[in-house]
Every structure is written in structure tokens, then in C-alpha cells.
Image (cartoon, helix red, strand yellow):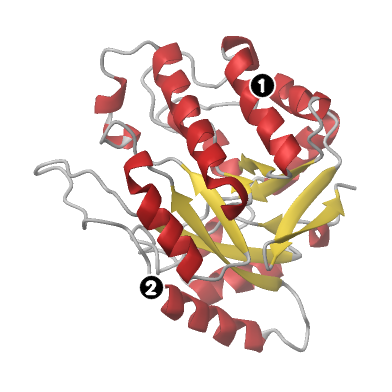
Amino acid sequence: MDKALYFDNHNHTQFSFDGQKADLEKSVRMAAQSGLGGICFTDHCDLHVPKMKERYEPPTDEEFDVEGQQREIDRVKALFLEDCFPKVFKGVEIGVYKEMRDKISEYLEANTFDEVIASVHYLEDTDPYWGEYYIGKTYKEAYGKYLETLYSEMVWLGDRFDIMGHYDYITRYAPYPEASILYKDFPDLLDQMLRFLAEEGKALEINTKTYQEYKGRRPVLDPHILRRYLELGGEFVSLGSDSHSPEGVGFGFGTAVEYLKTYGIRYAVHYEGRVPVVTGLL
């Protein structure tokens, strides 16, 4: 496997609220040591964060210092200029939330990125990580609501984003025996989402962090979703480790690439100045 073909498009640094173990320069060095072709830093921007009483008291939002992050990226890029490897890009993981649409629009208009990931971290004024979201819901209700929310906000964002982030994030902390989002459970909704990505030229993210074991559960990437994506005209995917430390950069890419090729995915994408650049999965 020629790792130089692969770009890790989803990484967090010390500029993210949950990046205490991260270090941007060390992450670039890890990408270089791993032989990756490039890395994009997509720190968190959630403009609405629910409060959970004494359990968790975050700030009113989770914006990061864009100027500070991009200055640090420029500094680190300069260290690698002679080798031109790996390439380093500036991005954001924007947390979509219907009530924050105006602020999200203003934020994206005010800042310049190579890449924008659209993700859902909070819904129904809570974080699935805390567990309360799942109470009283079947797995189909909980997962379905999440998918519906992500789809509606992607449609609203339109050309302001590039990658649909971790559509199966909702499975990570779920209490159900059903640990994965499967095409057979949500065919109509997944068709809507995958058709939208294909027709609008957006990327389907393969988030390798999702497929790590967590408390005895390990979600899987349903091959039927990959096949349907291809049938609907989708061509490429975005690989992302969702790293929050240098050690996580490129996690699981070898396994993921072989899996994708098995089920017909031939192209991966990264973004430079919001322009997609496609490479083959050889």
C-alpha cells in the first residue's frame, strides 16, 4: 500500500476544546513518519453546547482560535518545505445545529479553510456521549433522528461544506446491541443522504475512530452503504482518523483502504482551497 496516496482529513490539535493531548507539530511529524501524503487539521467549532449541570460545564460554545491555529500550521509547514511532504492543510469541523444556522453562516463566511467537515455532535440539546439522548428511544429512533438531523443540515449548508463527517458517530456511545448503522435499517434515509453527496460532489467520510472498540462494542462499516453510494453515483471517500493526539494520526488506514477496495471504492479525496483533489486507492 502506497500511503503517500492517502491524506488524513480529520484531525484535532491543542486548539480544540478536547485536544489536551494533541500537538500540531507532533501530529505532522507522525504523518511524515507514517508516510502519509498529507494531513488536514479540522479543529472543533460548535456554536451551541448544551450544559449538563454538575457533570459537565463547557463554555457557551466550542470555537477555536482560527488565527492562532493557522499561524501554527504555517509555522510547521515551513519546517517541511524542503521535503514538500507531507502536505499540511487548514480545516474546520463545523458542528451543525439548526438554531445556530445564522451564526454558522457568519463563521464560515468570515474564515478561510482548505476543507470544511459538517458533523453533528449535539442534538435535542444534549450530547449522545452523556447517554440521556438514548433514553426512551429504540435504536432505530435514536439513529434515525441523528441521520435525519445530519441530512437536513447538510442540505441547508449546500456549497459551504465538503465532507459529511462521521455519519455513524451516534453509534459510538449507544447502549443497544445494534452497534452499527446498517443500510437495511434505514434504506430510504440513507439513499437521500448518499444521493445528495453524489449529486453535489461531497465526500463520504470513513472515520476510522468510529470502528475502534469502546466498552466492548465495535461498530462496523456496512458494505451495503458503500455499494449503494457507488450505485447512486458517488465516486470517492474522505479518510479521517479523528485523531486527538499525534499517536492517532492515520489510525487504521491500512485496514480501511483494503476494506474499501474490496467493496468497489477506488478513489479517495482531499481538499486544497476547498477544491477536491482525487487520488486512487492502489
Residue 93 screen position, x and y as percent: 49, 54
In this view of the protein, which residue sits in the foreground, 29 or 44? 44
Residue 228, picture quadrant: top right
Viewer-nearest of discs 1 and 2: 1
> Which circle marks residue 65 in the picture?
2
Residue 232, picture quadrant: top right
> Which circle marks residue 266 in the picture?
none
Q: Secondary structure at mark 1?
A: helix
Q: Amino acid at mark 1?
A: Asp
Q: Residues within 10 Å of mark 2 (few under 14, many from 20)?
A: few
Residue 165 screen position, x and y as percent: 55, 43
Q: Residue at x 18, y 46 (%)?
A: 56
Which residue reaches farthest right? 282
**Mark with earlier residue (1, 2):** 2
Instruction: Look at the picture and state if 141 lies above or below 160.
Output: above
Instruction: Look at the picture and state if 192 lies above or below 125.
Output: above
Residue placed under numbered mark 1 in the picture = 191
Residue 55 screen position, x and y as percent: 14, 42
